[in-house]
Image (spheres, coloured by chain):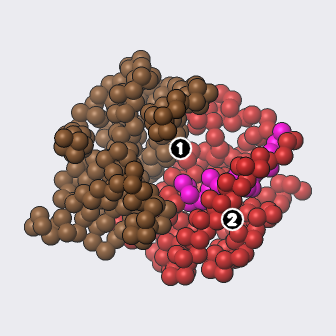
Chain colours: A brown, B red
Amino acid sequence: MTTMAINNRRVYGSLNSPATLRVLACLFEHDLDFEFVPIDLNAGEHKKKQFLSMNPFGQVPVYEDGDMKQFESRAIIRCMGFAYGKEGKELIYWDAKEQAVVANWIDVEDHQFEPPAMKLINKPTNGSTSDEAIVVGAKARLTKVLDVYEARLTHFKYLASNKYTIADVVHLPNLHALLGSKFKNLVESRPHVSEWCTEILARPAWAKVLEMQHKAQV
Amino acid sequence: MTTMAINNRRVYGSLNSPATLRVLACLFEHDLDFEFVPIDLNAGEHKKKQFLSMNPFGQVPVYEDGDMKQFESRAIIRCMGFAYGKEGKELIYWDAKEQAVVANWIDVEDHQFEPPAMKLINKPTNGSTSDEAIVVGAKARLTKVLDVYEARLTHFKYLASNKYTIADVVHLPNLHALLGSKFKNLVESRPHVSEWCTEILARPAWAKVLEMQHKAQV
């Protein structure tokens, strides 16, 4: 029953948070019902007592599935992959050595891709302009990362293998934002990276995330 | 056969690198034979062509298991947990929801614990003193993180559960270094964190890592 499913599965997050968006994309990939509970980051709701009781580090999203609460977005996605992967449609591999490659590229996204990407995407919130030195450094770093991706994607259709996996899912929000920024050429100038982006951002699950964002802004 | 096992499993790394040490600890936990190939970071060996062909991001360690090469330390450990976990002695859970909690606390170590811990542990290499503002910020951040750990460890013997898991393993190198630094009071002043540290640093697998370090320095 939908109602029961909704009662069991909740995402507390913000549609402005890449971490929240990647969890939503994964829920849609798995066709899972859930309730979305918006957390107002501007009002500092994530630093208040009630939220801290779910995530003591005060960050979105928090994911609730029955009596389990989890708050690291990539951990949530990994576990969703294992808990809800349907044979032939998994976003993971059941074999430990094949899954090792997926795990490797999830951590590459986490450690190599996201840090410089976020620096290029995020607009300073205090009205000041971006620190030029930070932008230059981030652009140089992301250039190197995308060169590695370009080489990788010459051999595989997706980042970990020829199958769409959670290693691709985790990239969605920041890739989407990068393509909407003045740095989109970093993606578009690399044919295999560009093709990969077009392919994964066209997933119906990602379209549903954008639709949620759009509806919330209307 | 030991020789065959050694031929199949190799760690390319440095005994000065926390990421390398956590992978070694995990290999010893699983009683796995391996060959250690030292990479000279001072000589920039990790930025040379031969090493970059194994890890395009030029970081240690690289782990080789048969025809699989993997280079993110936490990804290596996760997969070792799944590939070599023996019933009753696993450092993971086979159940997706129980493993979700382990995955959550691995990412906490990665995102919350390691960044400030590294800032307090690392001595500046260029002969200059540490930037005081960085140290103050890192200390404040780590204080908050260890307060969360203290609360968590009041309810569970280990970080993810009452069982020793890879969420604990990933902490070993930086915890060990922290206890050898002038910031050891951050650990020792918190009874549950202190007890947890004593317990996990006393694991025979960790003793074997320290022995490797000791032998290499003689």
Residue type marked 1: His
Question: In the figure, residue A77 lies in which quadrant?
Answer: bottom left
Residue A117 shows in this picture: no
Secondary structure of the residue carrying tag 2 is helix
Residue B197 shows in this picture: yes
Front residue (pair A191, A208)? A208
Front residue (pair A17, A92)? A17
Q: Magenta stretch: give its range.
A: B109-126
The residue depicted at 27 percent of the width and 59 percent of the height is: A37
Quarter of the image containing the N terminus of chain B?
bottom right
Question: Mark 1 Cα within 10 Å, few/some/many (few <14, many 20+)?
Answer: some
**Any magenta on residue B209?**
no
Residue A48, image x, y percentages: 43, 65
Residue bearing mark 2: B175
The residue depicted at 54 percent of the width and 54 percent of the height is: B111
Residue A181, image x, y percentages: 39, 26
Residue A28, image x, y percentages: 22, 50
Whether the residues at callouts 2 and 1 have beta carbons within 8 Å, the answer is no
Q: Is residue A31 above or below residue A138?
A: below
Q: CA distance from mark 2 to mark 1?
A: 21 Å
Question: In the figure, residue A32 lies in which quadrant?
Answer: bottom left
Residue A159, image x, y percentages: 40, 36
Question: In the figure, residue B120 lies in which quadrant?
Answer: bottom right
Q: Is residue A157 above or below residue B133?
A: above
The secondary structure making up most of the magenta span is helix
Q: In which chain is the residue bearing label 1?
A: A
The residue depicted at 63 percent of the width and 75 percent of the height is: B193
Residue bearing mark 1: A111
